[in-house]
Image (spheres, rainbow, N blue to C red):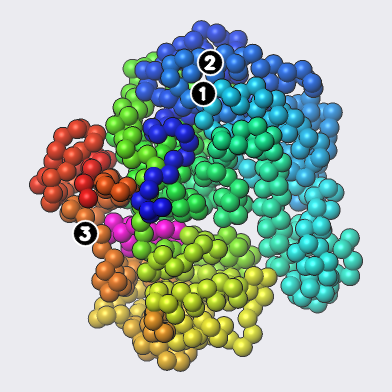
Amino acid sequence: MSKFSKTYATKEKFMLHGGDYNPDQWLDYPEILEKDIELMRIAHTNTFSVGIFAWSTLEPEEGVFNFEWLDKIINDIYSIGGRVILATPSGARPAWMSQKYPEVLRVNASREKQLHGGRHNHCFTSKVYREKTQEMNERLVKRYGSHPALIMWHISNEYGGDCHCDSCQEAFRNWLKEKYNHNLKELNHAWWGPFWSHTINDWSQIESPSRNGESAVHGMNLDWKRFVTDQTISFYENEIVPLREHTPHIPITTNFMADTHDLIPFQALDYSKFAKHVDVVSWDAYPAWHNDWDTTADLAMKVGFVDDLYRSLKQKPFLLMESTPSGVNWHDVNKTKRPGMHLLSSMQMLAHGSDSILYFQWRKSRGSSEKFHGAVVDHDNSTENRVFKDVEEVGKALSKLGDVVGTNRHSDVAIMFDWDSHWALEDAQGFGKKTKRYPQTLQEHYRAFWEKDIPVDVITKEQDFSPYKLLLVPMLYLMSEETIARLKDFVANGGHVVTTYISGLVNENDLTYLGGWHKDLQDIFGVNPNETDTFYPSDRNRVSFNGNTYEVKDYAAIINNNKAEVEGIYLEDFYEHTPAVTSHHYEKGKGYFIGARLGKDFHRDFYQTIIEELSLEQNLPIEHEEGVSVQVREDESTKFLFVMNFTEKTQSIVVNKKVKDLLSNQEESGNIDLPCYGVKVYALEK
């Protein structure tokens, strides 16, 4: 199969547009439900996720089921040409279940039993809850599995959290027995048990981490996080058994998330593992556009990074499962999108690999916590308000982009993101508590390529390195022997790799390597960083590189140079004139080491030298200034160029070839004015 062959998320070959629909909240308002179908058509929407939190309506009493309302909703959506993503309702239990089966409720880390309420307040180990969810899903698939409207299964909603009940403790111990070959000596070595006399001599002595008990055994903390991911996946796999059995042709997903303030990947679960169990990656994106801490372009870069991670997890298009057409109700400040931003932010999702624009929510709730969360349909029920018009505009735009569906992008550059490493680094009692910022550091390296319109895959340590010319592994604190060996093979075979301070310090069990930096890393990079200087906020140093001077903040590795070329040096402190930036040829490839945390001015200049050396420029027929981004998706015959203005002013771009703007259906070339938040989608024949 060609790298430009199309891969479709569902059987449909159009852009999905619509989102979460909660008709179970409106069953006493039939006129509202009737109005919804009319509004769906007007808004140019075509796909709706239903049933996500509908358990108490589907099964109001144990063993009493009510599906007739859902029959009508699905049939009505299908009658206007719409499609349905049918959710399993396990994200929130009905009260009768919590009352009758209290074992389904979670226990927190302090060993306190939680009360009924909220969402995902359930134990993933509970046999009762696993039986109940599978029974419900069996009924759903038998009733709707052959319905022509059904295009995907949406499993639960935004998995997260953990449980510390007795069942989970036993499951954790069994997980550890499996991992450590039923050998307590292996476990005690991995956890460095003699420290503080924490050696375990019976499996029953193991408890999950708690501030009330053990929280300083880093190997245990890391294993607990891994266990929580595996146990969540196990619960998910239990949910989907009847769906796989009866509808093997219907793809299955569950919605991933991102932490919102800095817009970094969600940290409570290792999505690199979870992605192997879903047919399509989908995620819920809620960037805080127009905030006080980012420029619009800065935030767009961060969105692009998370998009590229979730696209790269399966190396195919993903789905935007939730977004907002306006504002949300849970940011510190819930600001609505300015005119033009909804179309621009939607097109950015497509540009980085989404085949959908789906919203939470279709209609605003009348009561409870989400009554002021953004929605397509507001409390006024109007088609004339600005938000509804914005959604309608996006719907019309998506209807013109059917040829983009299923396309992907080729990347010569990859950057590695690792959940294990982030967990271990955050747990490490060293460096600076507030300045580690591992995901944010990766984004700063990613920025140098995003600003140059050079596509980047954000990959994980298990993925294949060989398709890339350049691999970036900044701040990869935790590196197993296996990862180090794969990096060495990558460079030996001609790859270029960049790493930084606070990299390769511990193995997969969070145990430090003895004898200095790992020998294979010294072979690759030709240096041995043997000390890390951690700065106070007021501390500064400078680095001289390529005739220019750059400011150092937060961290500086003090480097013993074995045989590397010194590209940059420190200018101050007791390590003045020592190496700060190095390069080293190893067999057919090259390793670069950046010893200090440096800003975007350094990254631009440093990576530009590598971009030129490896001929990474895209050679796109678009010239533009800073703040405009051009992203590409392509198939065998066409490149689709998304040209996006992430600034608050009109930007002039130069189009050096005649291209067709798919949104306006006009051919364009030459000087083009792109207004504030303006976007073009050009088709360029190969």
Q: Label 1 sits on what residue type?
A: Ala
Question: Would residue 256 be found to the left or right of residue 123 on screen?
Answer: left
Name the quadrant containing residue 419: bottom right
Residue nearest the observer in this picture, 499 or 413: 413
Range of magenta residues: 441-458
Q: Which residue is mark 1?
A: 149
Q: Label 3 sits on what residue type?
A: Asn
Q: Label 2 sits on what residue type?
A: Asn
Question: Would residue 446 be found to the left or right of residue 262 on screen?
Answer: left
Disc 3 versus disc 1: distance between alpha carbons? 43 Å
Q: Residue 75: which disc?
A: 2
Pick whichever of labels 2 and 3 is earlier in the sequence. Answer: 2
Q: Secondary structure at mark 1?
A: loop
Which label sits in the foreground, 3 or 1? 1
Image coordinates of residue 277 in percent, x first then y, are 61, 48
Disc 1 versus disc 2: distance between alpha carbons? 8 Å
Q: Residue at x 56, y 35 (%)?
A: 249
Q: Which residue is mark 3?
A: 619
Residue nearest the observer in this picture, 177 or 92: 177
